């Protein structure tokens, strides 16, 4: 299963590894290994094939439950953690396709196959990745990410208002960055 793919993709020269070694690995490290050879052109398919279908990383039920409380702004799935860490290593080009493939509107990808299944997940991960990348050279990617994010309707929950305010702030920062790059 997933461990065999991990060995094939990221540790082909290692021998004498047992299942206990892999089971002791943090899920984020397993994702990192599984996606270590992925390119921007195939990252979405790799995430769908290797991550989304595997209960080791998260379940759809966790995502639904997470939507119901303030933890939505704090809790991260292993995939989201990997995305944020990857962006902070100046690889926004690798995570942008995953965020964009998660868009809620006009998306040909079935909901269960979207890497970030809720609007809160998509927005918070997009913001964390864009703000976490150390380079300003990714304006086009940030703009494409922003355009893929859902439009938020007003809701009474405090966490939702915070998410909305953060998204508005990001739009202002993008406009400023665009002005500076001209």
Image (tube, rainbow, N blue to C red):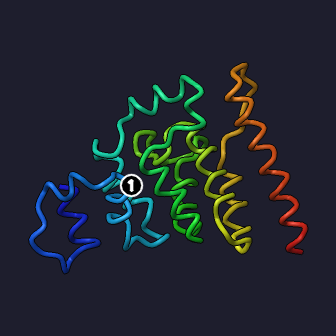
Residue 155's x, y, as percent? 72, 22
Whether residue 125 sits left or right of residue 152 in the image: it is left
Image: 98 above or below 136: above
Which residue is pictured at 31% across the width and 56% down the height?
50
Q: Residue at x 38, y 55 (%)?
A: 28
Residue 162, above or below 127? above
Image location (x, y in percent) of residue 159: 67, 29
Q: In the structure shown, which secondary structural element does the residue marked by tag 1 occupy?
A: helix
- How many numbered circles are shown? 1
Instruction: Pick the residue in front: 99 or 164.
Output: 164
Compared with 123, 138 (above or below) is: below
Residue 23: percent from left, percent from top: 21, 52
Lateral position of residue 104 relative to residue 10, left or right: right
What residue appears at the point 70 percent right and 53 percent down from the top-left corner? 146
Residue 157 is left or right of residue 114, and the answer is: right
Disc 1: CA contacts within 10 A as few (<14), some (14-19) or many (>=20): some
């Amino acid at each position: 299963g997933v461990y065999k793919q991990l060995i094939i993709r990221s540790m082909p020269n290692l021998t004498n590894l047992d299942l206990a070694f892999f089971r002791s690995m943090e899920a984020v490290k397993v994702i990192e290994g599984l996606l270590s050879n992925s390119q921007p052109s195939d990252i979405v398919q790799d995430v769908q094939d290797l991550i989304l279908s595997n209960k080791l990383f998260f379940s759809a039920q966790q995502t639904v439950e997470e939507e119901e409380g303030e933890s939505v702004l704090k809790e991260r799935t292993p995939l989201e953690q990997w995305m944020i860490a990857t962006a902070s290593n100046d690889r926004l080009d690798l995570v942008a396709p995953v965020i964009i493939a998660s868009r809620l509107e006009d998306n040909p990808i079935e909901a269960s196959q979207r890497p970030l299944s809720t609007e809160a997940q998509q927005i918070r991960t997009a913001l964390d990745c864009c703000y976490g990348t150390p380079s300003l050279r990714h304006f086009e990617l940030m703009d494409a990410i922003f355009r893929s994010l859902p439009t938020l309707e007003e809701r009474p929950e405090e966490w939702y208002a915070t998410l909305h305010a953060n998204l508005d702030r990001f739009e202002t920062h993008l406009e400023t960055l665009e002005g500076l790059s001209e």
